[in-house]
Amino acid sequence: MPDPRPSGAGNAGARLDRLVEIMRTLRSPDGCPWDREQTLESLRPFVIEEAYEVVDAIDRGDLPGLCDELGDLVFEAVFLAQLCAEDGRFTLADALDAAAAKLIRRHPHVFGEDARSDTMTSDDVKRRWEQIKAAERDSAGQPPSLLGGIPGALPALLRAYRIGRRTATVGFDWERPADVLDKVREELSEVEAAVQREAPDAVEEELGDLLFSVANLARHLGVEPEAALSGANRKFTRRFAALEQHFRAAGRALRDVPADELDQAWNRIKQTERT
């Protein structure tokens, strides 16, 4: 069994300490004016941006870039913890201790006295994880809602996926992918009806229902909807860049090319990719 206790002065630990000291210097009276002005709220967009840059490096298979972006993301975590430490709320050490304790608590099959990881499947582990999280919410006096722990700030498509996955743990779900497909068709027809009525509010609502259904269709098919949409975005971007290059080589601006000619060139690019 791995030893979950803190090790000695490891390389990562020493470097994390150095980063913390740099952050303290930046926040000191003789530090950086910009860093001293920041608040939890002002750092929010930077945290989101750095997290997305980590994901982007993963998607591109850029390991040197991933190393760099992970460092930036850790720095944002250190920055947030420093602000909270200055206000006497908690320190980075508190956050790290909480993370370590949580991982040990949620992996009783590895760290518990009755460790039995060799007899558990991945699905068993996920079910047990959700049970432990639910027990934690109960002990913390949080609302008993099954969906209460899903962050509201998640990207909407991912949150729809997580909501469906969470309610499925208590049997509130479609039985088969075909049933979800029927729901997608139903929601699409409701979008069409709202468009025909020229009702903008209804169109927005029905489009939301359609997207929610599509996210859960992806879940039933074993597909991460965010990953699927990201792949589609990359494919479109790649093909559009090829379209731009095609007409740029001919000395033509896209805005001057007739729509039917754009479509023909687009279809040729698609066909070239497929072959």
Image (cartoon, grey):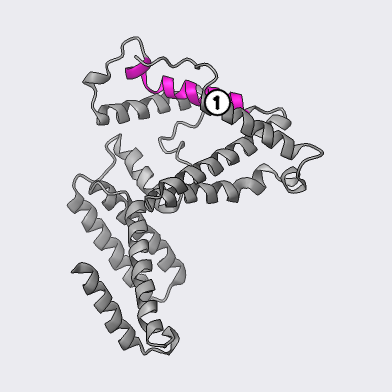
Element marked by disc 1: helix
Magenta-highlighted residues: 92-111
Quadrant of the drawing holding the N terminus: top left
- Closest to the observer, 43 or 150: 43
- 227 shown above or below 39: below
Whether 262 is drawn above or below 173: the answer is: below
Name the side, left or right, on which 272 lies relative to 258.
left
Q: Residue at x 32, y 18 (%)?
A: 109
Question: Hey, which quadrant is residue 187 in on the image?
Answer: bottom left
Which residue does the image show at 68% across and 28% down from the upper left?
A: 89
Residue at image mark 1: 13
In the rendered image of this protein, does residue 228 appear above or below residue 106?
below
Give the position of the C terminus as an image quadrant. Answer: bottom left
**Left or right of 58: which side holds 13?**
right
Residue 186 seen in render? yes
Q: How many marks?
A: 1
Toward the right, the furthest residue is: 29
Where in the figure is residue 154, as x and y percent of width and height? 47, 47
Foreground pick, 270 / 7: 7
Q: Is residue 83 magenta?
A: no
Q: Position of residue 4 (x, y in %)?
A: 44, 17
Q: Quadrant of residue 80?
A: top right
